[in-house]
Amino acid sequence: MRIGSIELSSPVVLAPMAGVTNVAFRTLCRELELARTGTVAGLYVCEMVTARALTERHPVTMHMTTFGPDENPRSMQLYTVDPEYTYAAAKMIVDENLADHIDMNFGCPVPKVTRKGGGSAIPYKRRLFANIVAAAVRATEGTDIPVTVKFRIGIDDDHHTHLDAGRIAAEQGAKAVALHARTASQRYSGTAAWDEIARLKEHVTEVPVLGNGDIFEPGDATRMMQQTGCDGVVIGRGCLGRPWFFAELSAELNGTPAPAAPNLGEVAQIIIRHGQLLSDHHGEFKGMREIRKHVAWYLRGFPVGSELRREMALVETVQQLADLVGQLPADVPFPADGHGPRGRQGSPSAVALPDGWLDDPDDEAVPDGAEVMHSGG
């Protein structure tokens, strides 16, 4: 799959996830793909950063933009609501050589974001959405840095926006579009509507269309591509606690033998490696607090006692982590029920929007106060 100047030998993209897809997790995914397939074939996107915070060089934001020394291509996702900040952030990325690819997030369903008109609320405002995408493309003109756009089906079942969003993004110069096949009101619940990915693919023919939602097994990616005609897949919750998933997907989509799922002993070594990478990035204190949620995902379905799980949920040092995972029975095979969704799912709910937001889809005014620091995607 080609995205502008970027040629990928596997049409698989890691979805940005707040508090997950930092340089430690991306490094681990890349190491495991290389070790199990002999190559790094997919695209690994960093955590989403806010355009305004980037231009203001917020220390936390700058830390989030860390890439590994051999990470290529370097992919950065921006959250933005304002064309001016969008242009400034994209120009900063170009001028300071901060990344090789810019993705733009218009899929965040978090209430504190949509309530101010950000995230998945923006594609409803067609002219504002166009202005934002155009600003990023304008800032990257004359470079090899492609701009891509990710969005949802719409606000809710009464306000679908994905077909317009895909068309507008392509018209403004985006090199690919990705659809999380849920509405904002669904959040992460229910079943992804793959048929809407197919509709988008029929509607947008100038650039690659990627599908996102409910890919938890390698075969799911094949089925999505066959059923929808999409050009690639974006992986979110399916890789939590399974950083080797990208090696399985690469093998599946390239028609090569799938690497064997790791047993518990191999998972234990992966946990230690992840913990060390997090400590290298954040320092041991924060790194060990970050690894705790990952441990729960790694051990899903394995027969691990409650006391050992509890101790791992309180781990404070890399050595303590190594000592604890060293108690796991190494020869236990990967569990049949160890797959499936992890992380947040939530329940469907009405989308919080600014007063009068739905009155005029052609209003291009920048929403007041929406350029905030937040998590979500």
Image (cartoon, grey):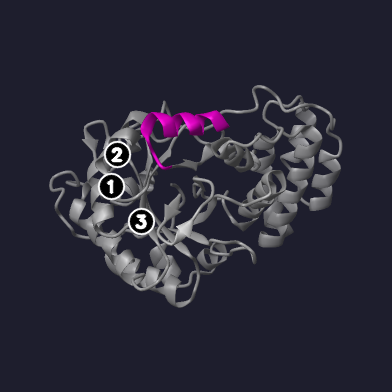
The stretch in magenta equals 217-231
Residue at (50, 34) in percent of width and height: 221
Disc 2 residue type? Leu
Quick one: label 2 or label 3, which is nearer the N terminus? 3
Label 3: how many Cα within 10 Å (few below 14, some 14–19, many 20+): many
Residue 272 position within the rendered picture, expressed as x and y whole percent measured from the top left: 77, 47
Residue 138 position within the rendered picture, expressed as x and y whole percent measured from the top left: 30, 69
Label 2: how many Cα within 10 Å (few below 14, some 14–19, many 20+): many
Image side of residue 375 versus residue 348, left or right: right
Residue position for label 2: 200
Quick one: label 3 or label 1, which is nearer the N terminus? 1
The quadrant in which residue 333 appears is: top right
Residue position for label 1: 166
Residue located farthest toward the top when viewing the structure as drawn: 336
Disc 3 residue type? Lys
Query: On screen, 255 above or below 48?
Result: above
The quadrant in which residue 353 appears is: top left
* Residue 154 in view (yes/no): no
